[in-house]
Image (spheres, rainbow, N blue to C red):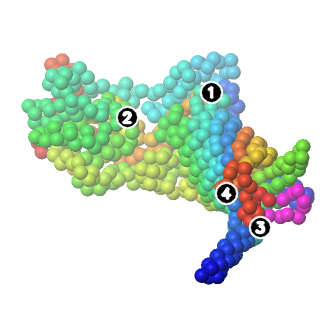
Amino acid sequence: MKKYSFILILLFFSLYSCIDEPKLEENNHSGNFESLWKIIDTRYCYLDYKAINWDSIHTVYKTRVDSNMTDFQLFELFGNMLGELKDGHVNLYSEFNTSRYWKWFTDYPSNFNSSVVYGNRYLGTNYMFVGGLRYAKIHNGEIGYIYYGDFSDRFSDVNITNIFTYFKNCKSLIIDVRNNGGGYLDLSEQFASYFFTQKTVTGYMQHKTGNGHTQFSKAEAITTSVHETIQWQLPVAVLSNRMSYSATNAFISKMKIAPNAVIVGDKSGGGGGLPLSSELPNGWMVRFSSSPMFDATMQHTEWGIDPDVKVDMNASDSANGYDTIIETAITQILKY
Amino acid sequence: MKKISLTIFLLSLFSVCAFTQQTSDKKYSLITSTNNAALTLFSITDPYLSPISYSGIGVGIEHAERKYFNPENTDFSMQHKLNSLVGIALNPSFSASTTYLGGAFSWGAFYHYRKFSDVQILAGATTDGQFGFKSNMRNVNNPINVDMAVNLNLAASLRYDFLIKNKKVRLIYDFETPLMGCMFVPMVGASYYEMFDLWNLRNTIHFSSLHNKLAYKSALVLEIPMRTSVFTVGFSSHSLKYGANDLVFKQNSFSLLLGYKINLYKFKGNDNTAPSNFISTEK
């Protein structure tokens, strides 16, 4: 009996060690570097798409890791290495700083002037405001204008019903998502559903299935449903600029194929990879694009969505209280 | 008239006696209920949330009920158990936390070996459903992971009775290990948006057996009889390791248990013991 018990216990512990665990790096400068590099190497989804030689990045940056570096210096080095990915969805978070890559909008015209949008010609001071949606009738009451600056601000169907009721005599609608850096994907789905007349495949999504740079799941269709009770079937213009990013980019991608919709402004900022998080041994958190998203034609949306009508803000228009992009949108939707 | 009345009285008396005799002959299964509160130290490694192990403290409750299938046959008993744990764990640098809320319900059948005096061995099988909710709110798009599993387990219990100051106390050692089942494990790169908004649940349900899931639960408990109940004190440990989709999950816990055990019956008065035809699995 004792013999069998011993064998059983031995079997249990041998099997226990059979489930191979990944090797964890030490919590020191070198270990944290290796850990960060490996997380990106195995889980970041755009290494091949962006033709980034991550092995050579390792070679270049590894030599810069010095055990005498302060945490601030190490953080800066890691931030610079992550900057090579040119991805606004990649950040490193510590107790003292957050690394970021912002060139996806700082290298482009801003195409948004809040003092003009909040000027008397558009929102003014008496605009309505609910669930993050600021709205007013513009252009002599012919057009409903909604400014939505953050897809993290939740709105409800009731909010939208009331807004559409307020706009019931308007001929068309403008949804301004410029400078909207994203938020919840499900909200972008919900917002788009008010403008579709039939269930439509508006994009696709994949995720990493293994450590290889090309190991992805089969593309899963993202379907935008028709909202059961709330519908806007008049012309709608969606305004975008380079700061329209992430969930906003996804919203623009859907609206691009919505009936009666036109995208006006600048190319959106992109951010087509759904970000996930992981952690280094020292507790710093890294966020990175993990699941690539595509538009309805299976094209990557990482670098942004081209507008239907490309227009930049004109400085003299701004000086006179006019928003060139809004004015162009008005012209476009009144053509319908 | 008097004769008739006497006959009726005697017949009534006879029938009451006969019924009483029938009642006292029939055996009933007593349900023995054990309730423990647990103070738990635990560690969690959930690579879907973070590759780093988090350690923390939690509290939980355990409730178990056992009875014989058939009071005429004291070889086979059944037991169901419900346990839960809520706790919070921190990463080694104390910069992030994982909140854990979990529980399990199990049902099992046991054979009672009584070959040795003072020692009783219960051996059997249990089946359980486990649920765990883990939340690391610092994460973006993967702030939550859920453990879901159904297991068929091998279970055993050793009971040893001995005297301390003429008081019969019982030492119990319980052991349980899963043999097979199925479990939910997300793909490492799949977000919950994709899984539960787009309903892409491919490769998330896995068959589990000793090749990819190893675990044990053990407990050592001392039972000290009190006037109408039994005081229980002990500790338990739980170790779980499973892997799928290139992810290896681990959970270890050590709990201090404190509770009581009672037979679920009520006859008259708090001090009254159950009649001998009410059969408890504790005997």
Residue that lies at the very extreme toward the front in this rendered image: B2
A133 and B153: which is toward the camera: B153
Q: Do labels 4 and 1 share a chain?
A: yes
Measured from the top left, where is residue A29 in percent x and y? 66, 25
Residue bearing the label numbered 4: B267
Residue bearing the label numbered 1: B94
Name the secondary structure under disc 2.
Answer: loop
Give the residue at x 10% y 40%.
Answer: A169
Q: Is the magenta stretch mostly helix, strand or loop?
A: strand
Instruction: Categorize mark 1 by other alpha carbons within 10 Å: few (<14), some (14-19), many (20+).
Output: few
Dot 4 or dot 3: first in sequence order is 3
Instruction: Categorize mark 2 by other alpha carbons within 10 Å: few (<14), some (14-19), many (20+).
Output: some
Which chain letter matches label 2? Answer: A
Measured from the top left, where is residue A143 in percent x and y? 13, 36
Give the Cα separation between the discs numbered 2 and 1.
28 Å
Read off the magenta span.
B109-120
Three-letter code for the amino acid on which mark 1 is drawn: Phe
Residue bearing the label numbered 2: A152
Q: Between label 1 and label 3, give the one nearer the viewer.
A: 3
